[in-house]
Image (cartoon, helix red, strand yellow):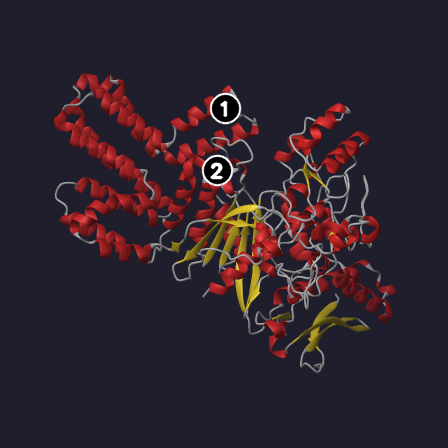
Amino acid sequence: MINVKFYLDKADKSKRFPIHLVIRQKDVQVKVATGLKILRKDWDNKNQSVKESDYNFKSINKFLSFLKQEVEKYFDAVPHSQFTDKKVKEKILSLVNSRKVNTDVKMVCEDSAEYEGKTKTTFVDLFAGAGGFSEGFLQAEHGNRYYDFLLGSDINENCELTHLARYNYQLGMDAEFLRQDITEPDFLDNLLKKLKSQEVDVVCGGPPCQSFSLAGKRKKFDKKDDLFAHYLNVIRVLRPKYFVMENVKGILTKEGGKIKEMILQEIKSIVDLKEFHQLIYFLVKLRKAEKEKVFTLDCYNLRMQFESANEKELEKLRDNYIQIIENKFRLLTPKIADYKTSKTDININTIRHGFNLLKRSKELAYVRKKVILEKAHSDLDNDFFAKKFDTFLTSIESDSIIEQIHEAFNNLKPAKTFQNEIAEIISALEIYNYSFEECIQGLQPFVKALKAEKEFEEILSHIRLYNIDQPFVALASNYGVPQNRERVLFIGCRKDQKLVKVVPPTVSDKEKVTVFEALYDLDFVGNDDEKFSYETIDLKSRYNGTTEKMKALIKKRSIDGKPDDKKGFTYAEWSKKGRLNGRFANSKNPFYVRSFEELENTLTHIVAPLHNHKTSKQNDDVVKRLKVILNTGDYDSAKKELKKIGLDSEKRNYNVLKPDSQSPTVMTIPDDYIHFSSPRALTVREMARLQSFDDSFVFQGKRSTGGNKRKFEVPQFTLVGNAVPPLMARAVALEILKNIK
């Protein structure tokens, strides 16, 4: 059996020790440098690994493990008669060198000496998609703080493929990926397993926004509407210092603003369990002082205990709560209905069965989820089937059940003598369904009667785990992105952290990056064309007569878009150079793969300077149509001419990009846009530029798809269109770093 060991050779001038590999097998002994250097204090010779004190320990150990396994495999496969010092050394060197070019075991390339004294801020990216948030956070550094990426999560395999290729293979990080629906019961368990007890400082993510969008039809009972609640469940468990939720502008006005207020209420309802006993003691105090509404206060006390209970405890508490109300109703029933009637009356039975339904809220929630999924799968929308599904779903919501119970009581027409008892039952049912914040509001009259407002507010300040201001609308172009994309940001701040209200713009209106700046250097592809290398664009010949005007649009800028003539780069130069900081200066070359199988086989990686720069195949009529629209300037103005020449289209819209301004919101369908100087749709790379992704960020898997496949597949165009612009995410990440404790 071959003996593979690692040892430290003599230190270099920087007092770092090269790691060498030595193999011994019979008469063969070969020593080979691995190309890695560490401090002596960080080497664990017994375990043949680097200690956690070294910044790069995970990646280095991963590489050493791979090298050992590959060498052992080689010796097992090759006949001993072929062993020579030269051949063995050549083989090991080839393994080492192959890892430097393009491999599944990438090295994190930061200078460990430089980062040794810096503070690491960890983050998790939920609903990660392509990784817009992740990319922006990794670009951000402030003072002695930087970000470390722990985990990304999404339900689509192409999101995972793009994540692994970028962060684990290309950049050499050990960021985990969880491909699972956040609504599944074991999601949190699996999330915690992957995090391995690591503390999370920041959680970011944007739940899918189709059902909130102002641009499209809003669907009632859309399966995506409750994803905020599941996102907040993650926050409750992880307790990060900050969290960021991103969505479309339509969320602010949906249901007349009720959805936004519900989200804010839910955030404020996340409690600090360590301090929660203060509220329970206070409620006991309120009850002792109360003479008339003791039952109601008992209900509030029991309802508040829901907040601190685990899942098993919660189920029992809810059952007990309804049982108490049911017992009160049993005592009331003989007073409002005779024995014979009480057994057959539809209203009495409605009340009883309503209690049963409320007890089974967990089971009904499961049914609700399944029905919503089936509604989505069958594409039920704006039809009679959808209405019937919605009617059923409404009927099993707790609000509707309580409303039905209330109506049944009214139908019984009880005597005035019993109205107070009935009102207490209805009130108790409403409290059962209250949010934490609604409970707080409901308790205010009792608090006021006791003159304990100040004490109550102080207790609330202790038990509320997160503070949050109103969500704000972030315009991407304010952060150096050449696109007028509006997104709403909710930034939750743990009570021990400074409140972040807004993210200040990094550029003024006059300083914003234009479409021409972003795309001019990529205009060297024709119809049904693909390029893997950059080409020089002759602006003089391309824009004869307007050359100086177009050149004036190209400005030297800092990383965030601020004009900087002395040290800056153009937007195109930044895109080619990359905006990641010095930690990743030695990251591997960009590459493209179509599948996980290709990802694991480094020989199939397509390595090139430029990726995702392929144009669609458009027939002659389409090209002619695009020329007319391009020359006219906009689609509406061109419709008359297109109809005249027989080239009119059923397509709802074409957006002609204006070179001297910002693009409209980048969507997921490429032919929604016409290039500012060529009659063609945009490439994935051009759309990525408009989103502020660096050229080194490669979108993996299928380029596009169509029809119903868009529901299940997330090709490159969809990855780009759904992404958070990295430069906007970077601004958010920086603002958090400036305030985090």
Q: Is residue 128 left or right of residue 654?
A: left
Disc on res. 225: 2
Q: Quadrant of residue 576 in the image?
A: bottom right
Q: Is residue 532 left or right of residue 297?
A: right
Residue in view at x 72 percent, y 69 percent: 4
What secondary structure is marked by label 1? helix
Is residue 700 visible in this depiction of the protein? no
Three-letter amino acid code at disc 1?
Ala
Residue 739's place in the image compared with 163, above or below, is below
Three-letter amino acid code at disc 2?
Asp
What secondary structure is marked by label 2? loop
Position of the N terminus, as image quadrant, is bottom right
Is residue 361 visible in this depiction of the protein? yes
Q: Is residue 13 left or right of residue 245?
A: right
Disc on res. 386: 1
N-terminal of the pair, mark 2 or mark 1, is 2
Picture coordinates of residue 678, whole percent (x, y): 77, 42
